[in-house]
């Protein structure tokens, strides 16, 4: 079993749609969780950290369920500019051991 | 703004050549990482370094070595390039209390 797994995608959604991505991790000792965004042929960039209480940043909401070892990302009112690959990232702490999921590709269609 | 630069965006090398990929960061970060990214496999950690002259193997270190002689510079070395090392190579850093990873633009290496 892979350490971090994500929905395989791709997700093709119309503008304005709400889309949710899921991520599961296998290491119960994991401490910090993130969503990164990677545009085509570009480097990954941090989208948001994921906190136990859940957190929201504009149209984006991230949630963490430690008991189920599950992370989610919800995007509301999708924009064309949201088209990218979304990477789930888990770390055990110490800022050194990062494990990346394979990513889920999103295409928002006009 | 953190800036992470990589020596080349695109590189073509022949099988058996020695290849150097360099990464430089300007934020005085302690931790530096080398990943490779392949379709369907995601990012896989090759090596990381948490201080000058310190290095730790990641998940796929075979065929690679690294060097960190200065805090701002982390080099990845392919001692004898092979075609299965054709990939996108990404350097990243973290530092301080933040676990945010800052990535360089990547080097797309093709070994023929």
Image (cartoon, grey):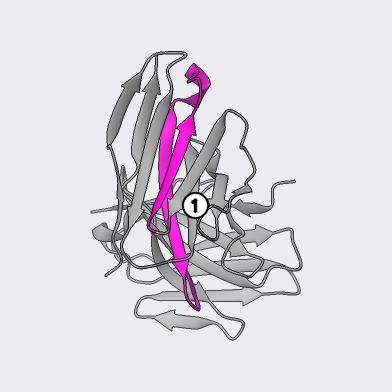
Quarter where residue B57 is shown: top right
Task: Please tell me whether residue A99 is drawn above or below residue B107 in the rendered image.
Answer: below
Residue shown at the point (76%, 67%) measured from the top left? A28
Q: Position of residue B17 (x, y in %)?
A: 42, 17
Residue B109 lies left or right of residue B5; in this view the side is right
Q: Nearer the viewer, residue B105 or A45?
A: B105
Q: Is residue A77 left or right of residue B83?
A: left
Residue B91 shown in magenta: yes
The quadrant of the image that shows the C terminus of chain A is bottom left
Task: Give the secondary structure at mark 1.
Answer: strand
Residue for point 32% across, 51% down: A39
Which residue appears at 50% of the width and 20% of the height?
B80
Q: Which sits in the foreground, A39 or B14? A: B14
The magenta segment is B72-99
Residues A55 and A95: in front is A95
Q: Which residue is mark 1?
A: B33
Disc 1 sits on a residue from what chain?
Answer: B
Where residue A71 sits in the image (x, y, percent)? 60, 68
């Amino acid at each position: 079993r892979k350490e971090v797994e994500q929905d395989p995608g791709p997700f093709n959604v119309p503008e304005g749609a709400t889309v949710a991505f899921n991520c599961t991790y296998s290491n119960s000792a994991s401490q910090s969780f993130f969503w990164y965004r990677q545009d085509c042929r570009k480097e990954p960039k941090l989208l948001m950290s994921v906190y136990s209480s859940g957190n929201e940043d504009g149209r984006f909401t991230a949630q963490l369920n430690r008991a189920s070892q599950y992370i989610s990302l919800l995007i509301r009112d999708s924009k064309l500019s949201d088209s990218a690959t979304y990477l789930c990232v888990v770390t055990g702490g110490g800022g050194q051991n990062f494990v990346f999921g394979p990513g889920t590709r999103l295409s928002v269609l006009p | 703004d953190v800036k992470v630069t990589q020596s080349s965006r695109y590189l073509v090398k022949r099988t058996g050549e020695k290849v150097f990929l360099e990464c430089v960061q300007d934020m005085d970060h302690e931790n530096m990482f080398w990943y490779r990214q392949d379709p369907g496999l995601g990012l896989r950690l090759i090596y990381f370094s948490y201080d000058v002259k310190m290095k730790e193997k990641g998940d796929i270190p075979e065929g690679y070595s690294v060097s960190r002689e200065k805090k701002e510079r982390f080099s990845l070395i392919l001692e004898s390039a092979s075609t299965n090392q054709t990939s996108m190579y990404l350097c990243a850093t973290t530092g301080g209390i933040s676990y945010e990873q800052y990535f360089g633009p990547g080097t797309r290496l093709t070994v023929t």
